[in-house]
Amino acid sequence: MKFALCRTVEIVVLAVLLEMLSLHAASDRGQPAKKVSASQATEIKVTLLGTGTPEPRPDRFGPSTLVEAGGERLVFDCGRGCTTRLWQLRLPLGSVKLFLTHLHSDHTVGIPDLWLTGWLTQPYGTRKEKFHVWGPLGTAEMMAKMEAAYAEDVRIRREFNPSLTAEQVGVDAHDIGEGIVYENAGVRVTAFKVRHANVKEAFGYRVDHQGHSVIISGDMAPNDNFRKHAANADVIIHEVGAANPDLLASSPRLQRLLLEHHSSPEDVGRDFAAVKPKLGVLTHYTVLQSEGYPEVALLEIVARVRKEYSGPLEAGQDLTAIIIGDHVTVRRATSE
């Protein structure tokens, strides 16, 4: 009897362990381990994959934002390290679609990695269809030339693995204008033009799903079109630029750079105060530096935003997640 009882306990323990392994494996494959509730089905989840600039910092990867809603995984901009962050979240690279705000290199340098690694057959790839990309005029041409640049790599890999189809390794790129650029599964993506110095076409994006919404500003100086499209948005993800005042006083070029390309902390505060989102989020910290001038600290940037705006505010960090539902919840990345 004692032996039979021990065997029964062993079987139960083994079954529990197998169930735990099954759930873990499902998570690693980027598949949900649990059923989604009715409230979760209407939520938008935003994750800041990268909050940095061209500066190659280990704590802030290049600009990139992930929006998950209605089963869609949409990535806005593809800066340095985008693919690493996606797989850090255990999301297969092949499961996302890409939208570009503009064609500056810090917003596009990660595209070859996302495209080429995304169709590999390992769990971190698994793309089954073409790589879908939307962006301003020049996007389709850029992607076509990217395909030409990597044609030999694609040939070698397909020769080694004949099961890879032309569809899997291909690119479907679209030059966009202002307006609705994508709509599926109750998720609508609207592009709107913003001011970004001499960039011919720069866009911000609005994502709407089941009565919830998020705005992604892209790089921009203050402009009325942004506020128009951000009206009534739940969450605004807003770029910000700053520099030491003495440094700016010494360099008219840097003054012009911040004035025409980016939004100062005070500009951001005024935008938030005008639109009144449920949460304003800072990202893409363009902090100009030069030897002999102290770097503007994040606390100072936040304090300057606060001069103009007293509402809910989050200083975004890489892997900060914002869940937009009946309430807006912020989940900050841990150091683990």
Image (cartoon, rainbow, N blue to C red):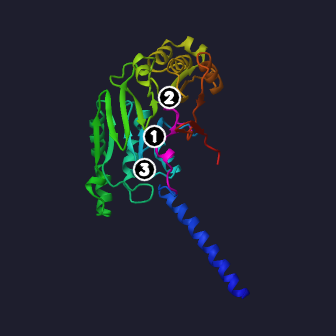
Q: Quadrant of the N terminus?
A: bottom right
The CA distance from mark 3 to mark 2 is 25 Å
> Residue 232, how many percent across, how many down?
46, 25
* Residue at image point 47% right, 37% down: 65
Q: Nearer the viewer, residue 311 or 242?
A: 311
The local secondary structure at tag 2 comes to: strand
Q: Is residue 227 left or right of residue 329?
A: left
Per the image, is 52 magenta? Answer: yes
* Residue at image point 50% right, 19% down: 271
The CA distance from mark 3 to mark 1 is 14 Å
- The residue at which mark 3 appears reads as 93
For discs 3 and 2, the disc positioned in front in the rendered view: 2
N-term mark: 2 or 1: 1
N-term mark: 3 or 2: 3
Can residue 204 be seen at all in this image of the molecule? Answer: yes
Residue 196's place in the image compared with 332, above or below, is above
> Residue 319, how many percent across, how many down?
55, 41
Q: Residues within 10 Å of mark 2 (few under 14, many from 20)?
A: many
Looking at the picture, which amino acid does disc 3 mark?
Answer: Leu
Residue 41's place in the image compared with 209, above or below, is below
Per the image, is 245 magenta? Answer: no
Query: What span is colored magenta in the figure?
Result: 34-57
- The residue at which mark 2 appears reads as 236
Looking at the picture, which amino acid does disc 2 mark?
Answer: Ile
- The residue at which mark 1 appears reads as 67
